[in-house]
Image (spheres, coloured by chain):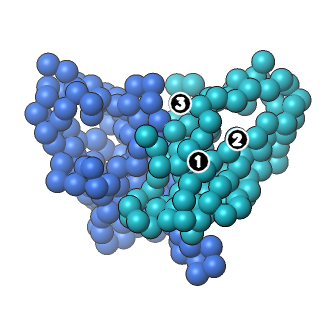
Chain colours: A cyan, B blue
């Protein structure tokens, strides 16, 4: 059971906009920033969004992040087939003194 | 360019130990920490702990306390993760990642992993 809660799956058609949610608590998302990682099949995770809504250099602006209270969201607009991957949210947890991850969301592009 | 290159796959028997290395290049090693993250087959990501490459300070996940040791060798820009008393549920791909952390009084802790190693598969089987 993951500390952060994500839907196990999401899907969309090419060109569509998809959002993935991440729910936490006051000790993690509620008091610290959220990061998102993309993991393509058979590869290491890649940082997609940091500090709630910042994109590392090279990440397309189709990817955006937001946070409100104890929840966060990742939005992907103009969905492309290469976006098919697992997506994980993560944050520091003040109570556990640890980085906690969501269980991951498998995105399927139909 | 920043690179983290990990050691090769390992097969261990239950009760044994494993030590995985992670050689960094392309940046000043002592300016960042290294976190270790593992992923069991078909499962999600699990943070194992962190080490400061600057002073060797560590912070381990509670469930691994007493079984894991993280170290660095600044002369070779290499980080190591040793896991002892291996069990079958330790079978996983182990990743090292460059840890970029800072604290802001308004937004709290921001701890992100901006570069990752390629992963090391550790299989624990009798």
Is residue B8 in view from this perspective?
yes
| Marks 2 and 3, how far apart at CA | 21 Å
Q: Is residue B92 above or below residue B75?
A: above
Task: Say which chain tag 3 marks.
Answer: A
If you read the primary sequence from the N terminus, does the residue marked by circle 2 or circle 3 appear first? 2
* Residue carrying label 1: A89
- First in sequence, mark 3 or 1: give its number: 3
Q: Nearer the viewer, mark 3 or mark 1?
A: 1
Q: What residue is pinned by disc 2?
A: A20
Q: Is residue A19 left or right of residue B32?
A: right
Contact (CB < 8 A) between labels 2 and 3? no
Kindly state the secondary structure of the residue where label 3 is placed. Answer: loop
Secondary-structure class at tag 2: strand
Crowding at dot 1, Cα within 10 Å, few <14 / some 14-19 / many 20+, comes out as many
**Discs 2 and 3 lie in a common subunit:** yes
User: What residue sits right under mark 3 in the picture?
Assistant: A43
User: Residue B23, labelled with which disc?
Assistant: none
Q: Position of residue A109 (x, y in %)?
A: 75, 23
Q: CA distance from mark 3 to mark 1?
A: 17 Å
- Please give the name of the residue rendered at 43% of the width and 40% of the height, measured from the top-left corner: A1
- Left or right position of A40 against B51: right
């Amino acid at each position: 059971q993951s500390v952060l809660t994500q839907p196990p799956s999401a899907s969309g058609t090419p060109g569509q906009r998809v959002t993935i949610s991440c729910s936490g608590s006051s000790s993690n998302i509620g008091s610290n920033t959220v990061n998102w990682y993309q993991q393509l099949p058979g590869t290491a995770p890649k940082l997609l969004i940091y500090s709630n809504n910042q994109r590392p250099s090279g990440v397309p602006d189709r990817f955006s992040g937001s946070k409100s209270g104890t929840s966060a969201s990742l939005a992907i607009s103009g969905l492309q087939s290469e976006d098919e991957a697992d997506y994980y949210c993560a944050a520091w947890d003040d109570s556990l003194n640890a980085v906690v991850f969501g269980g991951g969301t498998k995105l399927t592009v139909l | 360019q920043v690179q983290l290159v990990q050691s090769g796959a390992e097969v261990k028997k239950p009760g044994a130990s494993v030590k995985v290395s992670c050689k960094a290049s392309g940046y000043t090693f002592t300016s960042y920490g290294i976190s270790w993250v593992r992923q069991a087959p078909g499962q999600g990501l699990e943070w194992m702990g962190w080490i400061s490459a600057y002073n060797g300070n560590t912070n381990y996940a509670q469930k691994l306390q007493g079984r894991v040791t993280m170290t660095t060798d600044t002369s070779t820009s290499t980080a190591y993760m040793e896991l002892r008393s291996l069990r079958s549920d330790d079978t996983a791909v182990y990743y090292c990642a460059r840890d970029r952390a800072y604290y802001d009084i308004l937004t709290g802790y921001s701890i992100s992993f901006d570069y990752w190693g390629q992963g090391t598969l550790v299989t624990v089987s009798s």
